[in-house]
Amino acid sequence: MKSRTKVVVIGGGIAGCSTLYHLTQEGWSDVVLVERDELTSGTTWHSAAQVTNFGMTQTMVGLKSHSIALYKKLRDDPDYPVGYHHGDGGIRLANTEAQMQGYRHFASMARGMGVEYEVIDAEECARRHPLISTKNLLGGLWDGEDGDIDPAQLCQALAFHARKAGAEVYRNTPVTGLTQHKDDTWTVHTQHGDIDCDVVVNAGGYRVNEVGAMMGVQHPVASMEHQYFITDDIPAIAKAGHRMPLLRCPISDYYSRQEKGGLLVGFYEQDCKTWGMDGISPGFSNDLCPDDLDRVMDVLEGAFERMPVLAEVGIKRIVNGPITYTIDGAALVGPIPGKRNAYCIIGLRAGLGEGGGHGWLLAQQIVHGEACYDTWVIDPRRFTGHATVELTARKAIEDYQNEFRFHFPHEHRPAGRNAKTTPLTPVLAAEGAEFTVVNGWERVDYIKPSPDFHPSLSFNFDEAFHVVAAEVQNVATNVGLTEVNGFNRIEITGADRHAFLDRMICGTVTARAGRVGLGYLLNHQGCIKSEATVANLPASDRGPERVWYGSAAASEYHDIDWLTVHLEPGEDVQLRSLTNDQTILVLAGPKARAVLSDCARGDWTAEAFSWLSVRECCIGFAPATVMGISFSGELAYEIHVPNASLYAAYLVLREAGEAHGLKLFGARAVDSMRMEKGFLHWKADLITEFDPFETGLSRFIKLDKGEFTGRTALLKRQEIGPGRKLATLRIEAQHAPVHPGASLMRGDNVVGTITSGDYGHRVGMNLGYAFIAPELARTGAAMELDLCGERVGAKIIEPSPYDPDFERMRS
Ligand SMILES: Cc1cc2nc3c(=O)[nH]c(=O)nc-3n(C[C@H](O)[C@H](O)[C@H](O)COP(=O)(O)OP(=O)(O)OC[C@H]3O[C@@H](n4cnc5c(N)ncnc54)[C@H](O)[C@@H]3O)c2cc1C
């Protein structure tokens, strides 16, 4: 066994084997995989091993396409062929028009990744899958690439090729401890000795938290028991003359695929069970949970109705094994928050379909610092302090019970709610607030017109459309108040704070006390890593001169890691998170100044406190820090208040607002208004696949200011020219917003991809942002949008159609 290597991957299931293989593909051959038992002795060996190409985001589709391409290559490799039934096809069934519309959107989205799904009717489903009945069926989504693979052969082949490239695999070698050294390298302690390394990767499957505990981390991953059975041979299959496609049923939560001459049918029952919550026996290896078919009777019935032939065949074998889940069902692949040189590839619930792609994207991150796609949807840092294993278990149960029921736009399911709240949450709920969830925070979405107001789940504009319109109207004519909780706030102190930020940000951001600036942080590829407001607070009785760095709520762990890792030795900079201590109340609208003046001492005129100013004050008696910042395009103030004083400040603002027509508004109104202003959202419009030139942020770049993170790469990208350009579009449809991922077309060619969309109530336009082929990215260019299967006109307009000279927010 080596005593030193570059990377140690812990775990030899599909996650670990794929990572090891892809590290060698990215050029790192001095890498090692350590497995406590034999390869695939965790979950992988007994997997149903279906490999599908379906994903709800382009990153998921892209990584699954990579799995399929890789598995085909391995299948055709004469040295070590893998059993892979590629191209049996698969159908996701639907019995509601809303589901069918969702499938049409996913087809539009996947087209941008070069993947063609088909949305077919019930008769066509039955033609392609001769065992199913069309009763209570509208149709389905056809994915021609679907198939299944031999999971053990796949892992052995990945290990074989990795070994051939120089990697080593140590079987029957349990990892017993991890030690991190001052220089951020690691020692991996195993039963057979220690291995020093630069980087560790946790690929421990359902033992993820045993490995996590070795580095003092609890990963938000929980396991569920999951069962399938295999039937005896079915004569109708032999007669069909082709292999049966895969089937996924959101009506009754089961799946099936062909297994030899019969079917494999797997179940997601309502009466489901977590597994291993109180610890896992060390001897549970190559093992299964006891069969319990009684538990799945509810969904079994649905499967029998859809495939009546199941009632006539015997069951050959039952498999019940643990499967890992996360809070949102997607895996955790990337850097472990708060740690250096430590990565994970865990929480895989469809590890065979996704594992090839996950290992690929992880290896790229380890070797190059970033992957070819923006990987936020699988980034471990997307969950923060609320993400306990207990919360994960509740979400896992909910997810399991809804396995094939995708989330609709604006849908937030009930499990694990109220994970993060402020003292105002119950107050706003009593005011009729409907909440959306942002990084666990309950944030006001809009104020319901009546307690029983429940808009339908749909890809069209829902019944809240007019409610949001009225909130926007009041903000535009009077004044609105909303709470923006969870906004990521880092206090930066120390003499070198400005030099540090100047190095991290690609433009020049003001260092003047009392002023606020906006800046963009780039990665080492010259693309967008983060967006931050930098507020320079003067010295006061509340502290010395300091910077408040503000960024998106979801970026809490992401940004602090990125900033921390770039601190230089000896630099006098201290970072302290205030995210959980301070909450923003946003006061927006032409009468915002009047309300503020009524509750806080001092001169708030435009001359004394202009746009992009910051000042400490009291709202009534509650300490507050006010910034002249607007995301709505109206005159607006962000009022930052410590949570302990939040209710007091809120009461004062509400009372003062009464004379000025103040009403509450929510995140949906904000989203509508920001679309009218050309303002961008992190991880929707601001992603690591594009640089600030492509994203239309040239005015925030200062190439001649000296070195900054990402500058060299940005200069190179500038030479090559843009791959895509962000543009604002007017969409000629009144019934539905555009959804992220949707494809913009010219004839049969995809010429762009939507990143955000919403109706602009003040300008009366349905708006979208999209990254567009550069030759088309000019005002007036016309194209078509595939809006849930319907071709509608789309035209590029100038950004910020509402108040393009920004006079209202500066007033
Ligand atoms: C019944 C069932 C059906 C499924 N069907 C499908 C399907 O059709 N399609 C699909 O894509 N997915 C399916 N899955 C899910 C899929 O099988 C898993 O997502 C995948 O196998 C997980 O792989 P992994 O590498 O993350 O974990 P594992 O396979 O569990 O691998 C983890 C490895 O880490 C090792 N390990 C743990 N601790 C240590 C330690 N301290 N030291 C060294 N090694 C350690 C373990 O021994 C194990 O080998 C199914 C799962 C189940 C249970």
Image (spheres, rainbow, N blue to C red):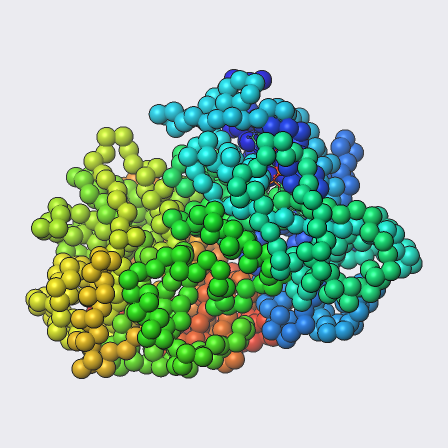
> For the point 14% across and 56% down, which residue is it?
514
Residue 799 can be seen in this image: no
Position of the C terminus, as image quadrant, is bottom left
- Where residue 471 sits: x, y (%)? 34, 78
Task: Name the residue at 26% across, 44% down.
Answer: 576
- Side of 278 where 297 appears, left or right: right
The count of marks equals: 0
Q: How far across and down, in percent of the image, does residue 801 sit?
A: 36, 74
Q: Where residue 502 appears, x then y in whole percent?
A: 25, 44
Which residue is pictured at 71% across the width and 47% down the height?
Answer: 291
The quadrant in which residue 712 appears is top left
Say if 339 sits above or below 90 in the image.
Answer: above
Horizontal side of 211 relative to 88 (left or right) equals: left
Q: Nearer the viewer, residue 727 or 504?
A: 504
Please determine whether, in this image, residue 434 is positioned above or below residue 235: below
In the figure, is residue 540 to the left or right of 248?
A: left
Judged left or right of residue 436, residue 286 is right
Residue closer to the observer: 30 or 213? 213
Asked if one can make out residue 406 in the rendered structure from this viewpoint, the answer is yes
User: Where does the image place residue 350, in percent across and percent down from the top left?
Assistant: 63, 49
- Which residue shows up at 68% across the image and 37% down it? 287
Quadrant of the image where one finds ligand 1: top right
Splitting the image into 4 quarters, where does residue 470 fall?
Answer: bottom left
For the N terminus, which image quadrant?
top right
